[in-house]
């Protein structure tokens, strides 16, 4: 007798897989996070995106809502992930308007380049506060809803998309160290520890915690701030990546859909590096 399809094939990238699910995303007006949310909305989810800039966040929410007729996307601007009170208010508004929070993307980040000797204690703390404390605050504020979602949609070895998942959008440069990035590297190392601990503490409640680390992704604010225009124009920067090119935001969205879909049901405490092999070869070939 043939093996039933459901036993070897999941439902990833099928229209409607995220129907009745709600995504809460910090940094949702940014290039990478908006692509992640857009893919989830296209596949059936409703979403709430959080940002500091009011008009940018609201207009991105309207734009993402066009991904699917009938989609509801709420944009909450004026928020600051450094403040737990600010995040609690966003969570409250999201639940009031959309009814629940099933998936969380902790994507807000702050960055600038600076050598350690030019970095004031406050400058270091500013990035730690946005990247690491912001990630903690996002987890803390959404956790009761993640647990409730996991209870409603228990994690099973079948083709049901379970609820109660968080993805931290991080980086891989702290594995090797990176000049001019002491603040962000220290924060990203903390996010590794935070996500791993959350995976252990909340796995028994059915909540999964994972990290996606985008590498050099074309057209992003990160590349704008950290990349070298000369090296990019000559193609040298792209050649340094083992795959010989920059990634696309779609490739980060693909990783997100995988982790939130039933194909990712058993993935917990993982770091999914999506960087063309870049961090394995910091100096290039
Ligand atoms: C040295 C700097 C600095 C710089 C700010 N500071 N910019 N020090 N070099 N270029 C110092 C200030 O002097 C101050 O210290 C302290 O940092 C706080 O600065 P503020 O401007 O008051 O902070 P704030 O208004 O909160 O802005 C935070 C920010 C800003 C991070 C500095 O850039 C920001 O809002 N960024 C949000 C958007 C963003 O960064 N997106 C990039 C994400 S991309 P003193 O001592 O003077 O008080 C990303 C990808 C990275 O993260 C991974 C790529 C691979």
Image (cartoon, rainbow, N blue to C red):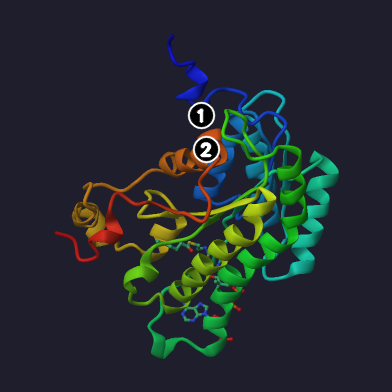
| Residue visible at 64% across and 67% down in the picture | 136
Percent position of residue 145, x then y:
76, 50
Percent position of residue 99, x then y:
82, 40
Vertical relation: 237 (above or below) 193: above
Which quadrant of the figure has residue 116?
Answer: bottom left
Nearer the N terminus, badge 2 or badge 1?
1
Foreground: 162 or 246?
162
Which quadrant of the figure has residue 201?
Answer: bottom right
- Quarter of the image with the C terminus in it: bottom left
Foreground: 125 or 76?
125
| Residue visible at 59% across and 60% down in the picture | 200
Alpha carbon of mark 2 to alpha carbon of mark 1: how far? 7 Å
For the view shown, which residue lies furthest in the left direction? 285
Question: Residues at badges 2 and 1 in contact (C-beta under 8 Å)?
Answer: yes
- Quarter of the image with the N terminus in it: top left
Residue 257: image tag:
2
Horizontal side of 272 relative to 95 (left or right) equals left
Percent position of residue 171, x then y:
43, 61
Residue on which disc 1 sits? 12
Horizontal side of 278 relative to 53 (left or right) equals left
Foreground: 224 or 45?
45
Helix, strand or loop at label 1? It is loop
| Residue visible at 37% across and 55% down in the picture | 215
For the view shown, which residue lies furthest in the top direction? 1
Helix, strand or loop at label 2? It is helix
Residue 177: image tag:
none
Q: Residues within 10 Å of mark 2 (few under 14, many from 20)?
A: many
Vertical relation: 211 (above or below) 176: above
Vertical relation: 122 (above or below) 149: below
């Amino acid at each position: 007798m043939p093996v039933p399809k459901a036993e070897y094939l999941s439902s990833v990238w099928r229209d409607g897989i995220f129907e009745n699910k709600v995504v809460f995303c910090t940094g949702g007006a940014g290039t990478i996070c908006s692509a992640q949310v857009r893919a989830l909305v296209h596949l059936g989810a409703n979403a709430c995106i959080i940002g500091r800039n009011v008009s940018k966040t609201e207009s991105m929410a309207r734009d993402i809502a066009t991904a699917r007729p009938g989609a509801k996307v709420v944009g909450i601007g004026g928020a600051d992930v450094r403040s737990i009170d600010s995040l609690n208010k966003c969570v409250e508004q999201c639940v009031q308007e959309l009814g629940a929070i099933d998936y969380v993307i902790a994507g807000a980040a702050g960055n600038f380049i600076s050598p350690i000797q030019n970095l004031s204690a406050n400058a270091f703390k500013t990035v730690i506060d946005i990247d690491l404390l912001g990630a903690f605050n996002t987890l803390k504020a959404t956790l009761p809803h993640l647990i409730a979602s996991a209870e409603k949609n228990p994690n099973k070895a079948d083709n049901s998309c379970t609820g109660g998942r968080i993805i931290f959008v991080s980086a891989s440069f702290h594995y090797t160290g990176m000049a001019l990035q002491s603040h962000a590297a220290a924060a990203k190392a903390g996010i590794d520890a935070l996500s791993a601990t959350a995976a252990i503490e909340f796995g028994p409640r059915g909540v999964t915690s994972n990290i996606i680390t985008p590498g050099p992704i074309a057209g992003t604010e990160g590349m704008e701030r950290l990349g070298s225009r000369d090296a990019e124009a000559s193609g040298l920067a792209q050649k340094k990546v083992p795959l010989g090119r920059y990634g696309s935001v779609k490739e980060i969205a693909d990783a997100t859909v995988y982790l939130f879909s039933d194909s990712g049901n058993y993935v917990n405490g993982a770091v999914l590096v999506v960087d063309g092999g870049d961090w394995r070869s910091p100096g290039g070939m």
